[in-house]
Amino acid sequence: MKYALVTGATSGIGIAISRVLARKGYGIVMVSSSLKHLKGAKRSMDERFPEIKAYIIEEDLSIKDSAIRLYNKVRELGVTIDILVNNAGFGLAGPAERIGIHDDEKLLYLNITAPTILCKLFLRDMYKRRNGSILNVASMASFQPGPYNSTYFASKSYLYSYSRAIRHEAKGHGVNVCTLCPGTTRTRFFKKEGIKTPVWAMPAGKVAEYAVDGLEKNKAVIIPGNINKILKAVPSGIKLAAVAYMKKHNNL
């Protein structure tokens, strides 16, 4: 059986991608910082896909050296990871000077350092086999700065740039690297930021269908929905001003 490793796998886009891949016959290694949520997600996967093997690994990827620990735990399972999905991440809303330094450090480690290290480690294994795929979950936030959400937007710009670069390197080794850039999605992301989920948010399941379809087609950048494709073409200065207005007047 082929296996996919999905970080942030217990809710939102992560659990949705896990379900789409399981439907396609992949065993799933689900990663989250919450053992309680992992156990619930595994029960759900076992009920939906009894023929598929689902493993769970508790690991908080916002902590230093956690990515290396996760890689070693996967090796201990004895499974080969054919698809790596770097999905775990969170955002912080507010003026830059008011956001706690420790909170920003955790965000940067989770959104930037952990996926970078996981790519590095699993690419080595994939290169040896000359086979494998990586899906890095960036965001429409990758394409412009985000006032009052500054660290999150910047972290997704990094992941977008890094993913595009290693895709170029990996293509000579039989490995595909794709970048998912979803727009506003109906997940717990907004609740964690302390704001309401916008009514126009796309369901996570629909985003997951776009993601896996794009991965199978080896698309460099996967942007779910026509509206998001149009928004990408809007000048970044206009989008920056719009983000600043919405965040400052609606949420803060």
Image (tube, rainbow, N blue to C red):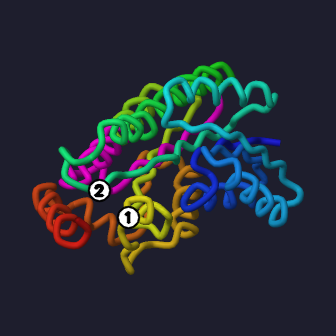
In space, the residues marked 1 and 2 are separated at their CA atoms by 8 Å
Residue located at (77% from left, 63% from top): 44
In which quadrant will I find the C terminus?
bottom left
Percent coordinates x, y for residue 143 in the rendering = 26, 51
From the viewer's perspective, tell me whether residue 146 is left or right of residue 54. left
The amino acid type of the residue labelled 1 equals Gly
Foreground pick, 189 / 137:
189
Residue 93, label in figure: 2
Foreground pick, 39 / 20:
39
State the residue position of label 1: 194
The amino acid type of the residue labelled 2 equals Ala
Residue located at (58% from left, 68% from top): 205
Residue lying furthest right: 51
The magenta region covers 130-159
Foreground pick, 204 / 178:
204
Q: Report helix, strand or loop for mark 2.
A: loop
Task: Give residue 175's quadrant in the image.
Answer: top right
Percent coordinates x, y for residue 186 in the rendering = 47, 70
Query: How dense is the environment of label 2, judged by Cα within 10 Å: few (below 14), some, or many (20 and up)?
Result: many
Percent coordinates x, y for residue 82 in the rendering = 68, 37
Q: Report helix, strand or loop for mark 1.
A: loop
From the viewer's perspective, tell me whether residue 46 is left or right of residue 64. right
**Mark 1 and 2 residues: CB-CB less than 8 Å, in contact?**
yes
Q: Is residue 233 magenta?
A: no
Percent coordinates x, y for residue 51 in the rendering = 89, 56
Residue located at (78% from left, 25% from top): 76
Up-down: is 222 above or below 57?
below
Residue located at (10% from left, 56% from top): 237
Earlier along the polypeptide chain: callout 1 or callout 2?
A: 2
Query: How dense is the environment of label 1, judged by Cα within 10 Å: few (below 14), some, or many (20 and up)?
Result: few
Q: Is residue 145 magenta?
A: yes
From the viewer's perspective, tell me whether residue 94 is left or right of residue 54. left
